[in-house]
């Protein structure tokens, strides 16, 4: 299974990088579980005139989980000199809001990748509780399942709190009135050499969390 997953990641990321998918700038993946994962930084972004690198592996994670858990997904596929996690108005967030409202989606999990220089592995941003509507029961599910699958160094609102009003999770929580989590994954767990075991452990932990969250929403 590991090799198949990694090969599918490589192929999808090649398509994203070479603009072979998502001509509209966004891919929406439909599901049955009312949880949506988003990858707003899966392509390069421009913030204050500075180009920031793509976090393309988040696109692969969103697609895999949507296909295997039947949750919804939203993947950014074009850089229009914008940053969906910083700009006040952004088409990615506009489409995301529409999808959430149309499909009565109950929870958003917004995926990002942080530098390998960070000393912790996972940073779950909740806006200090505000973005998740103080649903600490859902937060505990995420924390428990990361630890269950050997992902140590899990912190909450440590560096990336997602408190800024224009982040995807802050915007969606405010506009759609649903719990929204921002999850930053350390790049050393998802590095360019394809750390197979850690990638699978992350996929397993998120899969289990989505299924458990479904029972509480």
Image (spheres, rainbow, N blue to C red):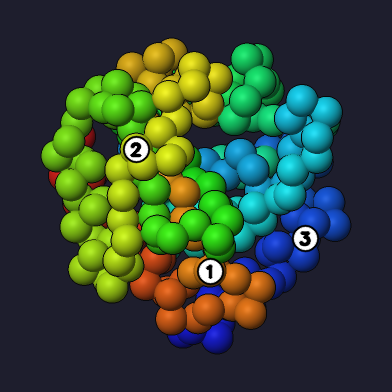
Closer to us: mark 3 or mark 1?
A: 1
Q: CA distance from mark 2 to mark 1?
A: 20 Å
- List the residue tagged with mark 1: 188
Say whether residue 187 is left or right of residue 120: right
Q: CA distance from mark 2 to mark 3?
A: 33 Å
Count residues near mark 1 (Cα–Cα under 10 Å), then give few for <14, some for 14-19, many for 20+. some
Residue in the image at 26% along x and 51% along y: 142
Count residues near mark 3 (Cα–Cα under 10 Å), then give few for <14, some for 14-19, many for 20+. some
Q: Quadrant of residue 187?
A: bottom right
Q: Position of residue 39 (x, y in %)?
A: 57, 44
Closer to us: mark 2 or mark 3?
A: 2
For residue 94, the mark is none
| 2 or 1: tag closer to the N-terminus | 2
Count residues near mark 2 (Cα–Cα under 10 Å), then give few for <14, some for 14-19, many for 20+. some
Is residue 176 shown above or below 100?
above
Residue in the image at 71% along x and 50% along y: 54
Quadrant in the picture for the C terminus: top left
- List the residue tagged with mark 2: 157
| Kind of element beneath mark 2 | loop
Nearer to me, 78 or 66? 78
- List the residue tagged with mark 3: 15
| 3 or 1: tag closer to the N-terminus | 3
């Amino acid at each position: 299974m590991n090799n198949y997953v990694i090969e599918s990641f490589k192929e999808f990321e090649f398509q994203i990088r070479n603009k072979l998918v998502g001509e509209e700038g966004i891919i929406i993946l439909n599901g049955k579980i009312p949880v949506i994962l988003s990858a707003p930084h899966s392509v390069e972004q421009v913030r204050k005139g500075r180009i920031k690198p793509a976090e393309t592996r988040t696109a692969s994670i969103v697609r895999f989980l949507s296909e295997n858990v039947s949750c919804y997904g939203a993947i950014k596929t074009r850089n229009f000199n914008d940053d969906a996690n910083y700009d006040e108005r952004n088409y990615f967030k506009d489409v995301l809001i529409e999808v959430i409202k149309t499909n009565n989606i109950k929870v958003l999990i917004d995926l990002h990748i942080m530098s390998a220089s960070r000393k912790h592995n996972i940073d779950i941003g909740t806006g200090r509780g505000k973005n998740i509507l103080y649903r600490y029961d859902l937060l505990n599910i995420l924390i428990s399942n990361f630890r269950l699958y050997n992902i140590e160094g899990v912190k909450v609102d440590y560096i990336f709190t997602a408190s800024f009003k224009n982040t995807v999770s802050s915007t969606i929580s405010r506009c759609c009135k649903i719990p929204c989590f921002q999850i930053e994954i350390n790049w050393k767990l998802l590095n360019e050499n394809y750390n197979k075991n850690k990638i699978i452990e992350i996929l397993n932990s998120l899969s289990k969390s989505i299924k458990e969250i479904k029972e509480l929403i």
